[in-house]
Amino acid sequence: MQENLKDIDLEGFLKYKTLYYDKIDFSIVKNSWESLKSHIDLPYVIHIVGTNGKGSTGRFLAHYLYKKDFNVVHYSSPHITNFNERVWLNGNNVSDELLENTHKKIQNILNLQLLEKLTYFEYTTLLALFISSKCDYIILEAGLGGEFDATNVVTNNLSLITTIDLDHQAFLGNSVEEIARTKMRACDKQMIVGYQIHESVKKTALKVKEEINKEFNKQISIAFVEDFNKYSLSVDFPRYLINNLHLVISCLEFLNIDIDLKLFDDVKLKGRCEKIASNITIDVGHNPLAARALKEHFKDKKITLIYNSYKDKDYKEVLKVLKPIIDEAIILEIDDKRIVDKLNLLEICKSYNIMTSFNLELKKDKEYLVFGSFLVVEKFLGFLGVDEK
């Protein structure tokens, strides 16, 4: 290390942190939590795991709890334009001052070895946990996985399972069942399973319940959301967001909190099928599951897709799914080693007869969908000059 990690501010500290890794070593964040936990009055923990819908489910829930006068933290990742987006506290992204003060407290508690070894995501998870001290609820959105995800370093009171599909197979497993098992084994007490496209996920949930009960001598209980047409809102949300809303309402019912649908009307779901102009929608999704949801949402329109993808994502299937609604694809050039080779992307578009260009010139008579990852949305918002906190 070029500098003493106990002497630098949060921005400088995070520059040293690993954003992406080849394997997960859960012991580092676990040992760090053991050192920190006596300094934190941890609130009721709601853990959200799944492939898609974690961010919108968490924000629906956090927004509602805040509207009901609870003190609540919503931890999500990654961010789109500002790091502060990762920690939402009582209606707003956390302030720079609170982040910096919390960072200094953690620096003073953890030893240098732990500070050096914690990854970017692990450290920001600990920041969120520290900030949540004395709150009523913390809603933790899992990152890559479930059982050995940094967000599972604390005992969760309630686990919410969003839609599960194939993603991150190198870490989580090669089948939907394996991935579901890895994610669901994060459950400690109560699990509520939301909308699923694979019947095997529900069967896996019952198997995981028996596994955990036997292996850890815990009494896990499971509830399944069965009716996804029971509630509707005055806001015209896409179908997949309404599905996530039903999981949230099941959670509120479990918590014995009364339901007032009007409280959801002004929720802001940044980057989740978000219309930022009359003809521009942004979505941070990146996999075939998200693509299918957007295809359904835009089924009566033709869109100009502004797109790029990480090379480890199934971009070929994503483009195949979206092809029926694509009028043209604009490849948003991004300088990042994780991004797929643009010649490869062009070749796939050509094989699907999708007209492509690199000319990002927006026209009023076109309907645009910006999609592919947080990085794509961030780059596009930068092109528009948007930099919100």
Image (tube, grey):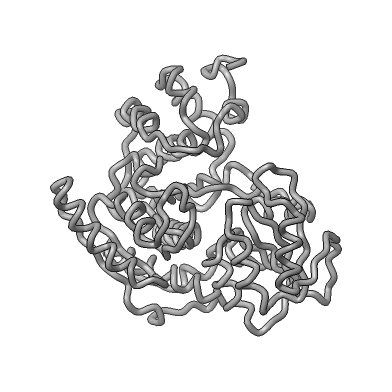
Residue 141 point in image, percent of width and height: 44, 51
Q: Residue at x 38, y 81 (%)?
A: 230
* Residue 72 visible in image: no
Q: Quadrant of residue 346?
A: bottom right
Q: Position of residue 201 (x, y in %)?
A: 34, 66
Q: Quadrant of the N terminus?
A: top right
Q: Seen in the image, is 364 located left or right of residue 167?
A: right
Q: Nearer the viewer, residue 94 or 339?
A: 339
Picture quadrant of residue 61: bottom left
Query: Between 22 and 247, which is closer to the camera in this rendering?
Result: 22
- Name the residue rendered at 52%, 18% in the picture: 6
In the image, residue 70 sits, relative to residue 306, either above or below, namely above
Q: Position of residue 377 (x, y in %)?
A: 68, 56
Whole-percent x, y for residue 179 in the image:
38, 56
Q: Give the left or right position of residue 137, taking residue 374 as reference.
A: left
Query: In the rendered image, is residue 251 in sight?
Result: yes
Q: Residue at x 20, y 51 (%)?
A: 212
Check the image and report above or below for 383 versus 222: above
